[in-house]
Image (cartoon, helix red, strand yellow):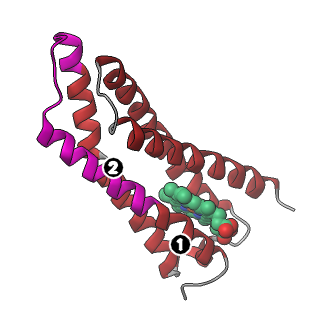
Amino acid sequence: MDTTDLVLAIFHHLLVFSLAGIIGAEFVLIRGDLSAATLKRLAGIDRHYGIIATLIIIVGIGRVIYGLKGWEFYIYNWVFWAKMAAFGIVGLLSIVPTIRFISWNRQASAGPGFQVPAAELASVKTCVRAEAFIFLLIPIFAAAMARGYGY
Ligand code: HEM
């Protein structure tokens, strides 16, 4: 029994479910009516994305170092690195939506007649859809790596 491992595992799960919720919320909201209130909500939700992702990295590294299996279990395992790559790609894909949400929210607050440009919306939809899809790979890699696949 190891309390540190348990606490890290609990936080890891709570954080990854929160991130899944955020991606899901963005996925749904960008498909609806993009009123000023929705744009404000999107910018607010997206701010939490960065905070949660940062905490996942901290807790995740904590699990590698202080987890029951020891860091050697992970760093020589290609499935672990596939999981890290997937997480990194999701992070990169989130950059364009973050920039757009901040800009749209600012423009909507400045002028009530603001309409989200169709081309910008299309690129954000593509990024969020790709994020959601690649995010699904992460728990698949996680489950495999935790069971020793990847050597
Ligand atoms: C820097 C980022 C991350 C690091 C360093 C990391 C690291 C780890 C470690 C060390 C474990 C323990 C595996 C074991 O029991 O041997 C784990 C488990 C897990 N991780 Fe992550 N993780 C990260 C991000 C994520 C993300 C974004 C998700 C999103 C779904 C995720 C989902 C999971 C799941 C579901 C498990 C449990 C696997 C199982 O026991 O079947 N992780 N992670």
Which quadrant of the rendered structure holds the C terminus?
Answer: bottom right
Q: Is residue 47 above or below residue 40?
A: below
Q: Position of residue 96 (x, y in %)?
A: 23, 44
- Nearer the observer, 61 or 111: 111
Q: Which residues are magenta?
A: 106-135
Q: Is residue 69 visible?
A: yes
Q: Is residue 137 above or below residue 23?
A: below
Crowding at label 2, few (<14), some or many (≥20) Cα neighbours within 10 Å? Answer: many
Residue in the picture at 41% in, 65% down: 86
Residue 110, located in which quarter of the rendered image?
Answer: top left
> Would you say the magenta stretch is mainly helix, strand or loop?
helix
Q: Is residue 83 above or below residue 120?
A: below
Crowding at label 1, few (<14), some or many (≥20) Cα neighbours within 10 Å? Answer: many
Label 1 is placed on what type of residue?
Phe
Count of picture labels = 2
N-terminal label among 2 and 1? 2
For the residues marked 2 and 1, what is the alpha-carbon distance in whole angstroms? 20 Å
Circle 1 sits in a helix, a strand or a loop, which is it? helix
Q: Position of residue 5 (x, y in %)?
A: 74, 58
Q: Is residue 115 magenta?
A: yes
Q: Is residue 99 magenta?
A: no
Residue bearing the label numbered 1: 141
Q: Judge left or right: residue 63 versus residue 36.
A: right
Residue 100, located in which quarter of the rendered image?
Answer: top left
Q: Judge left or right: residue 58 versus residue 84.
A: right
Q: Position of residue 67 (x, y in %)?
A: 69, 63
Residue bearing the label numbered 2: 128
Q: Which mark is residue 99?
A: none
Q: Judge left or right: residue 102 versus residue 60.
A: left
